Amino acid sequence: MTIKEIENLSGMTRANIRFYETEGLLCPERNSNGYRNYSEEDLNTLRKIRLLRTLHLSLEDIRSVSLGRSALTKVLSSHILHLSNSMEDLEHCRNICSQICADGTDYHTLEAEHYLSLMNAPSDTPELKEDTLEKVTAPWRRFFARSIDFSILNLVTDCFIAMVLHINIRSFSTGILICDWIAQILLLLLLEPILLSLTGTTPGKLLFGLRVTAPDGSRLSWHDAKYRTWTVLRYGYGFSFPIYYLVRLYRSYQSCKNEEMLEWENDSVLTLKGKSAPLQVVEFLAADAFLFFLAFLAGQSGALPVNRGSLTIAEFCENYNQIQKYYGISRPVNVPDAAPYNYIGLPMILDENGVWQNLPNYSQSFSGNFGELPALRFTETDGSVTKISFSQTYADENRSVTSYGDFIAAAAVSYICAQDDYFLLPVTPDRIYREIKEKADVYNDFTFDAAGVMIECHVDHSGYTPMEHNSMLVPEYGQEPYYSIEFTMKKGGTV
């Protein structure tokens, strides 16, 4: 039989028949063309379902007897008792209604407590259970929606720290982490109430089909939205304090899973628009990857030099001072009585003429056991720097020599990333800095070119022994140490 034929014979609609198929109560065969072919047995099953549902049996009871888990007579006997109780309840309700009518009471003078005492009504009647707002649990959806919102806030703070303050967001210093944490909380308290009061959702909630409203379905007021956000931060996330944050997350998860009312839900209602789980996973991963990529670009943008295009000597030096601060570059400076190592690290600063500035209270020459900072040579064309070079040689001197890798790498970023031909991807400032420093730190010759700038470095040494990780060359006892380095960075082709 076709679907149309079994509709007519069973007295059920097509929607009914499809529903019982999805519930597993009906399993028709299919023809070779894929269409359902209903049998007489299927028709009898539908008629049985129609009868039992008309008698107000539940689907679970019908499924139980159809699968042979329960006897029909036992289920019906239990149902008869339920119907008898229902009849008594209905008769009692009819009597109370008659009493109210006989008393001539209207709604405004209705003494509800008196009639409730006559009924001895419980507080969990089926009607009261139905008259409740649907509780949205979905703890994982809510958590990942919130994580998207936090990622967006983190992106905003990262952009400000990297692109405005030119601080390396990957340095993970305690000060930066604390400032970033405070900024994210303040931004959340500022922006989320505005979004909730205007749109009823946030980017993360929108992605997962979540919406926040007042109990009457209207939008939250700004004051209520701010209170909700504050309470979420306090009770849901514990203000992101270590350990306590995990405790609050776990407790919120358990309360949500148990369908308990959370602290921030007293004056708001969360609704959920259904989305398939695979689609939500794809959307979340795509959004998270996109935000990660934007955060990466923000960090790299922070390493771009402040001056771009054709550079004067002063502009290059300003670029270099910015970059060495961004990457936290320092050089060892001899300090008397600074036990146990007799030196400290200080940043290398260039003045507007390209000369190393005198460092306060310490010698600029590094004339003790460490190599000096090289004097830079600049070649200009029409006031624009086209070539930067330096050379340094030590012969028969008791000096420990560092690689100059950090200095060379910072100079390369300061010059290459300032060129008009330079683009942030794929040769990022971090990549330039890392590759050049790695090449220089092994004390060998190397070349590098990008954005029309060619770098060439020649290193020669003997009578030296590299320390662990090639961090420094130290003279060998009884040898004649010799070290030479020549570095050239030129715009416009081969050096």
Image (tube, helix red, strand yellow):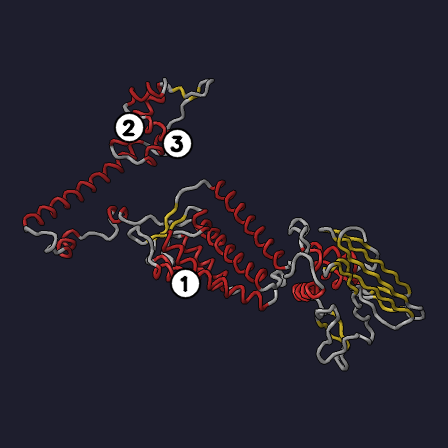
Quarter of the image for the N terminus: give it.
top left
Q: For numbered disc 2, what is the local secondary structure?
A: helix
Amino acid type, mark 1: Trp
- Relative height, residue 236 to residue 23 (above, below): below
Q: For numbered disc 3, what is the local secondary structure?
A: helix
Amino acid type, mark 2: Arg
Which residue position holds label 2? Answer: 50
Residue 230 is labelled as 1
Closer to the chain start, of discs 3 and 1, is: 3
Label 3 crowd bin: few (<14), some (14–19), many (20+), radius 10 Å: few
Label 2 crowd bin: few (<14), some (14–19), many (20+), radius 10 Å: some
Amino acid type, mark 3: Thr
Closer to the chain start, of discs 2 and 1, is: 2
Q: For numbered disc 1, what is the local secondary structure?
A: helix
Which residue position holds label 3? Answer: 22
- Contact check, label 2 and label 1, Cβ < 8 Å: no
- Residue 147 pos. (x, y %): 49, 54
- Residue 250 pos. (x, y %): 47, 58
- Between label 3 and label 1, give the one nearer the viewer: 1
Quarter of the image for the C terminus: give it.
bottom right
Q: How far apart are the alpha carbons under marks 3 and 1?
A: 44 Å
- Relative height, residue 401 to residue 3 (above, below): below
Horizontal side of 415 relative to 184 (left or right) equals: right
- Relative height, residue 201 to residue 67 (above, below): below
